[in-house]
Amino acid sequence: MEIIDILLAASFWEAAIRIATPLIFGVLGALICERAGVLNLGIEGIFTAGAMAGWMAVWLGAGLWGGVLVAALAGAFFGLIHAILTVPLGLSQHVSGIGVTLLATSLSYFTYRTALPDVSSPPRIEPFRPLDIPFLSDLPFIGQALFSQTAMTMLALVLVFVTGWVLYRTPLGLAIRAVGDNPSSVEAQGLSVYGLRIGAVVVGSSLMALGGAFLTMSAFDAFFFGMINGRGWVCIALTVFASWRPGKALIGALLFGAFDAFQVRLQTEVGAFLPSQVFLMMPYILSIIALIVVARKADYPKALLVPWFKGQR
Amino acid sequence: MSSAAHTSSETLQDLLLSLAGVTKRFGALVANDAIDLTVHKGEIVALLGENGAGKTTLMNILFGHYVADEGTVTVASRDGTLEQLEPGAPQAALDAGIGMVHQHFTLAENLTGLDNIVLGTESIFRVRRDRSTARAKLGELMAGSGLNVDLDQPIHKLTVGEKQRVEILKALYRDARLLVLDEPTAVLTPQEADSLFAILRKLAATGLAVIIIAHKLAEVLAVSHRIAVLRGGAKVGEMKTSEADHKSIAELMVGREVPASRRTPREAGKPVITLADVIIDRGDSRRSLHSVNVTAREGEILGIAGVSGNGQAALAQLIAGLDKPDSGTVEIFGDKVTKFDAHTFAQNGIARIPEDRHHDGMVGSMTVAENIAIEDVRSAEYQKLGFLDFDVIRKRAEHAIADYDVRCPGPDAPARLLSGGNIQKLILARVLEKSPRLILANQPSRGLDVGAQSEVHRRLLEARQNGAAVILISEDLDELLTISDQIAVIHAGHITPAMPTESIDRSELGLMMAGQKAAPHATTTTNPGETA
């Protein structure tokens, strides 16, 4: 019965949505890149760069939304590096992605350490406050679970809708879906394969960086080492789970958030019997199981990982 | 544009496209040598030539994928004035009304036909797509041309013929005035090809100009108004189709006389392989066989006619020993086979010419010599003290290269550098040098030019003369009717009883391949090709 109580509490869903937010940004970003045919394993590093850059901008005196913008630009920068290496140069997307992750992570730590050589505890900023929307935030249950989140969570939810609309309702989305399936189809119709792919990777990487920024500017109020903690990699798996669809990406991220929130609560209930590490593993194990169940028949974008060169057919 | 019918191809004011002195060099290779070509409104021009004759280079120049070193491309603009086409700009070619249907379709398989057609024709930054005007325009185009296809199906659900129609509609939707088709019939059944030609004639009658790139002669003779022949990068001949004949064009293309393949009568010997009531059930009909009876005899070529994807792959896998039947028996020289693996079958003298010669026939990164030896590295002949003896391997390869006229830099060149025709010769050398008892030839001349095709046929007939059995899986009616002694038809996993080639009517064979007609001598034990 305690489990039912956990699941019915508004605070549980509030936590689940909060935990899901950076993943929503990350999956949307990964999904846009992969729809265009580029796997972006730079995601883990881009999360770190976004977390560091956004936080540091605010710490240096920029407004919170200024910080969000700086984070997005940092993501775009590392996305551009990955895009140039993998799209016109056609290098291995795996190798380039891992390289970008190492580069972006190290550069972020380096910048942080150089700017703050001898602080013992990370300096804090004033993060995004939970929203207090008149009427909506006062609704029972949903008011606490959904409408008392921060503005960045609202942004993530809006972006799910926007990404879906762009992919499925606009000519641009049509071109992105086509370039990830058969780049020649796009070229034959007079569009630029390189332009579409580079653009998708840059925009996708910006979204990933917002996921990182959420951590330092919304969930917490400081930057510290190792704080991304594999969230980027989780997004790569969730992208497959979502079958490259924004709506399912939202469901996947929420599911993961719910697992995570659940294990924390379960720990307090039955923590006496089981070591805490078992609970920490739970969301990951459940993700793997969900992945096996849902994604075994995954319909990958056909041109994913396949470099395309102009003039070769 | 005048509204008069443009059936004449001679009037100058109908000139649509003119290539003058187009030359393209790749290093020392002259891919196109001062080529002149004109196309008029309403005219169907066939551009013929062997692989490597320069057809594709010329079309790539026309489309702005390459820039010519010399020469000009002139297109009549929509108001009738002649304008030079901007070199190296695909968008300029599209704008000038040139549409191309590539041999390998440029369609995104995850999108619908409609989406593929509209892709790139509307401003990319619109907030919404507009489908109703596109639908209306396409409806008119389909009604006027007979290019009927369900535009709301994703491409991966369409047949090859339907995909091709989407490609043509794509060009027409952009108001193409010149349509270039690269090997359009390579993937079509004879019936589909006929219907394509009917559509092209209809379109030409409305003023559309068409260039068909081809190396199959019979069909371009049927559909084109004029024929231009390329060889070695230069235009070696041009004529009205009405004044052309099969033999002279073939010789123009190849540059020498092409020996006609001819079977000399021969008594068939004892059965080499016999499949009795073989059933392989893999769920879908492409990979299944339904109670199949096939016998291949010594000194006989058994043709298996059928459109790709009707169970040929299952049959080929079984005969190569790569798969085993769910029920039924396979006998080799009268002995029932109990162990199904490729090595055992090869030991019994079964050799194969695989369908996908690039993928299954060779290893691109290995040398020509290694590829020739690859199936026999276990034999003592190639070994010395347990190591491969590369002197022997290389010597054997040199012989094979000379005997089979494999054009390559030498035995140590990586096999991936070879053209399709030369890869096939390499495979033939590997297969035939072992004097096999049964040759499984799966689409052996698909995609080859006239010269290489006739070489393949000559070699298979030679093996037959020497007493080998040949199973020839093919969808090329000309090939089947020329070199097979017996022909059986495969459709949806059913194989008809073999019929003597002499008794077969060409058009009936086409219908049987399409599953629309039963075999004339069907017995009750085999299903005569009705859908399962």
Image (cartoon, coloured by chain):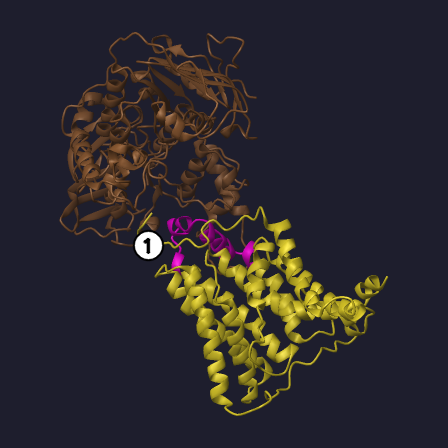
Query: Looking at the image, which is closer to me, B324 or A77?
Result: B324
Q: Quadrant of residue B531?
A: top right
- x and y, in percent, of residue A246 in the image: 60, 58
Relative to A146, A161 lies left or right: left
**Whole-percent x and y of residue A116?**
51, 90
Q: Which residues are magenta?
A: A166-194
Q: Quadrant of the C terminus of chain B?
A: top right
Residue at 59 percent across and 89 percent down: it is A123
User: Is B249 within the magenta?
Assistant: no
What is the letter of the brown chain? Answer: B
Q: Label 1 belongs to which residue?
A: A310
Which chain's colour is yellow?
A: A
Q: Nearer the viewer, residue B103 or A300?
A: A300
- For the residue pair A6 and B175, the one nearer the viewer reads as A6
Tell me if B272 is positioned left or right of A180 in this view: left
User: Farthest right residue?
Assistant: A1
How many numbered marks appear? 1
Looking at the picture, does residue A134 appear above or below residue B360?
below
Q: Is residue B497 left or right of residue A23?
A: left
Q: Position of residue A104 (x, y in %)?
A: 46, 74
In front: B314, or B51? B314
Give the residue at x 43% y 36%: B165
Q: Quadrant of the N terminus of chain B?
A: top left
x 21%, y 44%: residue: B413
Q: Is residue B365 depicted above or below A256 in this figure?
A: above
**Point 40% across, 30% down: residue:** B342
Q: Secondary structure at mark 1?
A: loop
* Residue B188 appears anywhere in the view: no
What subunit carries mark 1? A
Specify the principal SS of the magenta part. Answer: helix
Res. B369 image quadrant: top left
Q: Amino acid at mark 1?
A: Lys
